[in-house]
Amino acid sequence: MDNQLFCCHNRGIKEIRSDLTVVDNYSLRTGVNDVVKSVVKGKEVYLFSTYNSLKIALPGTYEVLSPEGISEPVSATFTDHLNNIWLEHPNKGVYRCQVNDDLKSYRNYTYYGQDDAHDLPYKLSLFKIGGRIALLGNDSFFAYDDIEDSIVPLEFLNACFKNIHGLRKIVSIDENHFWALAGNSIYRFYCDGYDAYLQENYSLGMNMFLVHGFEHIAVINDSIHIVCLDNGMLYYKHTGSQESRVKFTPAPYLASFEMVDLSGDKQYVSVWKETRVPYAYNSVNFYFTVPDIYSSSRYFQYRLKNVDPDWSEPVKKNTVTYPRLSQGKYEFLIRTVDHTGSYSEEVSFAFEVLPPWYRSYGAYIMYTLCLLLLAYGIWLFVLRRYRIKYLQQIRLAEMKRLRELTGELKEEVERKNAELLTQTSFIINKNELIFKLKELIEDFYTKNRTVATTQFYQKINNHLSNHMHAEDDWKMFLIKFEEKHTHFFKQMKMLCPKLTSNDLRLCACLKLNLETKEIASLMNLSVKAVENHRYRLRKKMGLTPGANLNDLFVNL
């Protein structure tokens, strides 16, 4: 200040001159926390914040004044537009003071802290915004309302830092730009007295720490600042626009996408294009990170559309698993969040879980074909059933018709049998009658042989012989026989072409299973002649002696 370099020392205020000599011209006999140049009661003064009270000195002189009334350590001193001097106690609240014109005593002062009527935090620190005094305590901001003469909350600053905890000190860069120092993080923010927003955010990590209880950033000029650390310092150079709202949370980087099946087999796929995931590998893993030196202080929020209704809680893990996803299209969203609640732009990755084989297009085609084949099979089955039923009805009708026809045929056969039997019986009976008549006539003629009886005998005998050899009876017999046993004679001629008409007549009699006597009567032969005829027939047909001739014709 005024081309003088002051050093606050635990043994007073030291002045370091250009030749690097150190002098102590202010004989404070106590440690000094801070020194500021201000105007009090129209006078330019140096205000020394010492270990035991406020000290006031006039520039150009080395006289030091100690206002009486407050004998408390002072860590920082500020003045406002109402000539109030604000004193910050290292441990308990602040004082708002008015000094007398001689600067040797306090006209009045008011304490603000936990034990006052405003119920403020026990520890408060001072800073100025827009020329007005502001207070910080327990991560809350307050301001002095000179109209109401009270301490009121600064809502716009509280909203800006609602997610930030452990705030220790505010350092002014210029009228509208400030540094906020927290536990192990620093925040650059803009505030014009009506609006506030964060511009930059840095986490110092595990190896760099602010000086606990003495957190500070030295502002060299508008662009170069020095962050004071417990073991060294950080050089900060600002190159951006101070008025722009900067998204200081970097977007995450999706490192890899992994598919896993039930057996644990894993497959990695590209994250640069939309991926189609086989249903067998429907458990997926996402791996992501932040390309940032302060990545250890970053959190992640993720969301899988169609699965998660909203963003997840901020987490520090860099992997997330979604097991057994169902068929469908998905979009995975990931963003970075810091402890201020600010988040980065979203990074998205789209993929599709394919349906299982039994729900694929090929499977549906197969199902359709199977249904068509089943329908066709059912149609054939029904058609076959109806066809069988129809055939059964036809068969039943045919069987009914055949039964009727069989009955008619049976009746016809029985009728023909009856006719054949009647015709045979008629011929046999007629021949037997004629034969008996001839016997009677011959017996009568033998006993009464005369000329007259001889002529009568001859006429009757001729007449009876003619009727016994009536060809018309045989023709009628053969007709009736042929009606019942169709093609019998043709078949016999095929078996034995040597057969004569008399042989065929004998065959017909044998077919009817007539006895020898009946055959003899029917053919008008003697029994002996019939036996001889049977013998000749056996020879013509080449039958062995043991073969039964009757059985042969019956079964033929």
Image: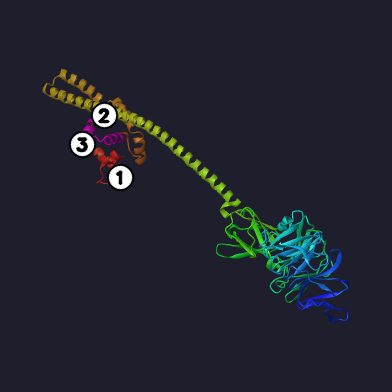
Quick check: 254 left or right of 9? left
Q: Give how far across and how far down residue 227 sits, in percent.
A: 77, 71
Mark 2: secondary structure: helix
Residue highlighted by disc 1: 542
Q: Give how far across and how far down residue 137 sits, in percent.
A: 69, 63
Upstream in the sequence, badge 1 or badge 3?
3
Task: State the residue in front, 39 or 67.
Answer: 67
- The picture quadrant where one finds residue 87 is bottom right
* Separation (CA) of disc 1 from disc 2: 30 Å
Task: State the residue in front, 449 or 120.
Answer: 120
Q: Give how far across and how far down residue 64 sits, in percent.
A: 82, 73
Residue at the image position 88 percent from the left and 71 percent from the top:
2
Q: Can you tell which mark lies on residue 528?
A: 3
Q: Quadrant of the C terminus?
A: top left
Upstream in the sequence, badge 1 or badge 2?
2
Numbered disc in front, either 1 or 2: 2
Residue highlighted by disc 2: 421
Magenta residues, dominant SS class: helix
Q: Quadrant of the N terminus?
A: bottom right
Numbered disc in front, either 2 or 3: 2
Q: Amino acid at mark 2?
A: Leu
Colour setup of the view:
rainbow
Question: Outermost residue, left direction?
Answer: 447
